[in-house]
Amino acid sequence: MSSTGNKKTIAFFGASGGVGLAALSRALAAGHTCIALCRTPSKLTDRFPEDKHPNLVVIQGNAHDASAVARCLLGREQPADTIVSSIGGVFQFSCMTIDDPQVCQKGMAALIEAIGKVRQEYGLTQAQWKPRIVVVSTCGISKAGRDFPLATLPIYKFMLKVPHVDKLEMERLLLAGTDEKGYTYTIVRPSLLNDDARPERKIRSGIDNKPPVGYAISRDDTGRWIFENLLNKESQEEYADKIVTITW
């Protein structure tokens, strides 16, 4: 299934702030139909009122609940063409971990289960529905070599150890289900995220084993890159089934 013309149906998980919100706001402005799962819908409905954003549907639910995720994937008239997952935990400096050390892997497990639920309920074959999953991961976990400056080594290897384990398991689950579950993917690995949006700065990217090395990139610029390269382009073949590292 595909959306009419070049307008897509996009399901968002983790879009109430940060990278996901940046991608969602641009997708809405471009006229795409957006379905967002949110534990507290007012976080989105207050920002995007229905009379001004009729192409947004907000569904209340938890991204770890496969049934709620499946409702989000169904969209309005057809299942989502593209799925954007940017869920994550809140870092707790006192114990150098996040509030839910398995937040990303549990979200990916629920998403893969939900895809199966939608296929079963509607009798969809892979030829009829093969969505693209766009997931926000992190640099610092590449097997291709160092993708961060040496000066930030303590941050990546010690401070972010727990969330990195979670991101790696999330990626493993995504890659393991590709053939069986019938979807394509793009894993986006941004460098250290901050809130200093700089739309004038060039965003560097590298695919798979050729990651660029950089200190940081803003959440807004990461969301913008995802929108411009993975959501709003008619063809997504350049990044199909790829890992993309991005940084300033």
Image (cartoon, grey):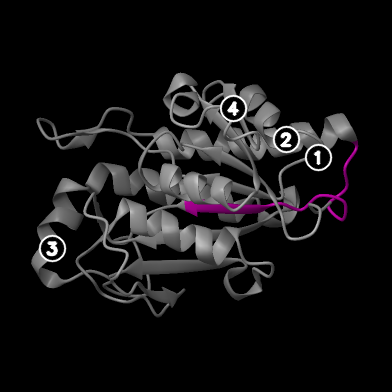
Relative to the observer, which residue lies in front, 38 or 32? 32
Relative to the observer, which residue lies in front, 18 or 129? 18
Amino acid residing under circle 1: Gln
Q: Earlier in the sequence, mark 1 or mark 4?
A: 4
Residue 183 in the image: above or below residue 123: below
Q: Residues under labels 4 and 2: Cα distance? A: 16 Å
In percent of width and height, residue 108 lies at: 54, 40
Residues rendered magenta in the picture: 123-135
Specify few, some or many for label 3: CA neighbours under 10 Å numbering under 14, 14-19, or 20 or more: few
| Secondary structure of residue under mark 4 | loop
Q: Earlier in the sequence, mark 1 or mark 3?
A: 1
Q: Is residue 133 magenta?
A: yes
Specify few, some or many for label 2: CA neighbours under 10 Å numbering under 14, 14-19, or 20 or more: many
Residue 69 in the image: above or below residue 209: above
Residue underneath mark 4: 50
Q: Earlier in the sequence, mark 4 or mark 2?
A: 4
Q: Residues under labels 3 and 2: Cα distance? A: 41 Å
| Secondary structure of residue under mark 3 | helix
Residue underneath mark 2: 75
Residue underneath mark 3: 152
Q: Residues under labels 1 and 2: Cα distance? A: 6 Å
Q: Is residue 40 visible?
A: no
Point out the frontmost of discs 1 and 4: 4
Amino acid residing under circle 4: Glu
Q: Is residue 203 left or right of residue 158?
A: right
Residue 181 in the image: above or below residue 109: below
Whether tag 1 and tag 2 are in contact, CB under 8 A, the answer is yes
Residue underneath mark 1: 78
